[in-house]
Image (cartoon, grey):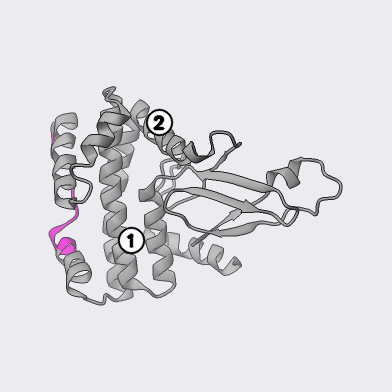
Amino acid sequence: MRLPFTCMQCAFGGDANSHPPYPKYVELRDDGRYEFTCENGHTTVTVLQEQKFEVLFDLGAYAILDGYYREAVASFTSSLERFYEFFIKAALFENDISEVTISNTWKQVSSQSERQLGAFIFLYLKCFSEQPSLLGQNQIKFRNEVIHKGKIPSRDEAIKYGQEVLDTIRPILHRVKSAFPQGVDKTVFEHLMNSRKADESQSVGTMSIGTIVSLNNGSGKEPSLEEALSEKRWWRDRW
């Protein structure tokens, strides 16, 4: 998965000696911070707005398109885990708990996915007075066989698993956006600021991309994973 970037200085700087801007495709980074130099020598630093769970789910989709079904299952699993982290942070930010306090506390469970899941379940219960809908037991068993026992899944199995992850995330994501609007904004803001820290003296832009599971989806259209794969295939083939 690569991201297209265009030099804004070439596009809007009015430099008569500059060539027309061509998109440059940059490999995905863990920190969401991208720096590239265009053919005219202009350096651009851009921070990707999307949260980790959004990007990871798309990675799973592209893995399916490329025929790497085991990797797709791993990416969908990571997406769900990072979504639980996003929920926890948004809920805590909504209650005016500081970023430093949240970060220091998260370190106590950052390497233990079961503890993170437990934190999510009980925080959800506190916020909404009901237990959350979780991944089905059959898919949990399937996931464990793939991740821990080396099972090689088929395409159909990977898509079925990805769809159930999608069906788990989307309703909760709608609820998060409605119940914790300030917490969601604060979570996104902190992500952007953390990615910018290395560039306090340098102008840094932001960028948003369309993802299958998306905080910024305002269209109301939520395609199935299979439908989304058709769209992703078109973009991939353009590379």
Q: Position of residue 16 (x, y in %)?
A: 86, 46
Q: Is residue 187 above or below residue 213?
A: above
- Residue 179: mark: none
Q: Main secondary structure of the magenta part?
A: loop
**Mark 1 vs 2, N-terminal side:** 1
Residue 163: tell me if it is visible.
no
**Residue at 30% of width from left, 41% of height from top?**
86
* Amino acid at circle 1: Ser
Q: Position of residue 97 (x, y in %)?
A: 27, 25
Residue bearing mark 2: 185
**Residue at 30% of width from left, 26% of height from top?**
98
Q: Position of residue 202 (x, y in %)?
A: 60, 37
Residue 78 as seen in the image, left or right of residue 11 = left
Report if residue 136 lies within the magenta region: yes
Residue bearing mark 1: 75
Query: Which range is magenta?
Result: 130-140
